[in-house]
Amino acid sequence: MSKLKIEGKHILSGEIQISGAKNSAVALLPAAVLAKKKSIIYNVPEISDIKYLIDIMKLLNCEVEHKDGTLYIDSSNLKNKPIPEELSVQMRASYYFMGALLAKFGKVEISFPGGCNIGARPIDIHIKGFEQLGATVDIVKNRYTITADKLKGAKIFFDFPSVGATINIMMAAVGAEGTTIIENAAMEPEIVNVASFLINMGVKIRGAGTKRIEIDGCKDLDNGVCEVFPDRIESGTYIIIGALLGDNLKIKGIIKEHIEALLIKLKEIGVDYEIDNDVMTISKCENLKAVNLKTLVFPGFPTDLQQPLVTLLTQAKGKSLVEETLYENRFKNTYDLNRMGAITNILTMNKLEVKGPKNLKGTHVIATDLRGGASLLIAGLIAAGETEIDNCDVILRGYGNLVEKLSNVGAKLEITE
Ligand code: EPZ
């Protein structure tokens, strides 16, 4: 198990370039099976989830070349095969092969997906959507066999605007006869990124990024080309680090509209920054103020930045109240934050109190999930002394070239086995 060792309290200055978005890229790869023969995906992040997805693509007889951040995919000899559990449990996004292969072949066999243990994370909305398109879903233990002689366009109303279900049903609907309408769809930028790829292949999609998406089924798709949007969660994480340790630190490649909720919250906390086009310049804020925070679906405050922001709130003056509305188990990182000297109290499954400011002291901690790991990384960067984060592979699942990016701006950290 890899460890991340961090020597805290180094001021950071220079430039950090944001990579392509994990939560877009992990959907774009499975979507590539819908292309006629070939796809090119630019700005692909260097993260472990991509490697696992490429393994699945190769299992399905695709040729995949990954060069300088670009993926060249040849799916002309694509074969539909059952996806083994050992591959699908590696990450949540393996479930995107459900929608893609169902549209392409009318059949898919795969296990329940993996992903961060931050709650029950059921996929009932996905399954209901596939059934409304006319598919049959057989579940044996946690193995799913989804089949359809013919998918038929339908009007589907989501009980909750799920990101994964919106993308999965959008892809399945490509293989359906007629038009599918998704009501109460998720509006996250990743949805728009995937829709732009499908549109580039020739699919007619209207309303991606809004609550109502219409997809016209399409048999003859073209080859596909797309670029992965910059990662708004990686952007947010480095911006939070900049508010704690920056000296005119530049975060390059941000899309302001994708992180608006964070920017507004930072202003409330007292953080100043400048944005010029896609570059933010940020410095350490001396007077952080406590605030109340509630996570919501996009364009509300993203749940994936809740844990990183909690680390910042341990340095803010006063009592902050954090309400996590998407997941029932996303405060595990606070145990280790408290061991580093923070004052946080879990009031209920989704309410947390944070009191500050408190100086943190480096110690031995463990990353339990991706963003929880990011919150401990930030704590290690501001703590006195050395912090050792066990199980740091979960952090590398979502942050490409982490050590390189932070070392280049003055941080002292390394990965050891
Ligand atoms: C995506 O997960 C992201 N993962 C998550 O990021 C992110 O937290 C989440 O969207 C919300 O923004 C990827 O894109 C790979 P959801 P997803 O379906 O698609 C419930 C990270 O750190 N729900 O929008 O799984 C579910 O339990 C990860 O990068 C159902 O009840 O999120 C959750 O409480 C963590 N039934 C809520 O909806 C369903 O069928 C949001 O889930 C589907 C979801």
Image (spheres, rainbow, N blue to C red):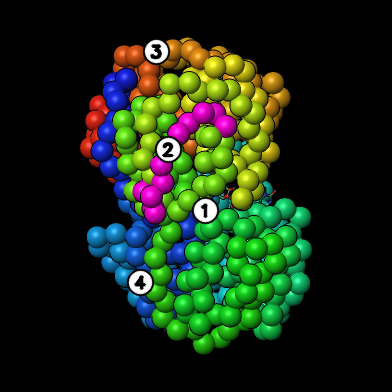
Report if the beta carbon of the residue with label 4 is closer than 8 angstroms to ligand 1.
no
User: Which amino acid does the dot numbered 4 rest on?
Assistant: Ile
Question: Contact (CB < 8 A) between labels 3 and 4?
Answer: no
Q: Measured from the top left, where is residue 195 in percent x and y?
A: 54, 69
Which of discs 2 and 3 lies nearer the camera? The answer is 2
Q: Measured from the top left, where is residue 167 in percent x and y?
A: 58, 63
User: Which amino acid does the dot numbered 1 rest on?
Assistant: Glu
Question: Mark 3 = which residue?
Answer: 361
Question: Mark 1 = which residue?
Answer: 257
- Return the disc, 2 or 3, that comes first in the chain's sequence: 2
Q: Dot 3, crowdedness within 10 Å: few (<14), some or many (≥20)?
A: some
Which of the pair 47/263 is nearer the observer?
263
Which of discs 4 and 1 lies nearer the camera? The answer is 1
Q: Dot 4, crowdedness within 10 Å: few (<14), some or many (≥20)?
A: many
Which span is picked out in magenta? 268-279
Which of the pair 281/45 is nearer the observer?
281
Side of 231 relative to 352 (left or right): left
Point 30% across, 64% down: residue: 70
Could you say which disc has been placed on residue 273 in the image? Answer: 2
Question: Mark 4 = which residue?
Answer: 40
Point 25% across, 62% down: residue: 67
- Magenta region includes residue 273: yes
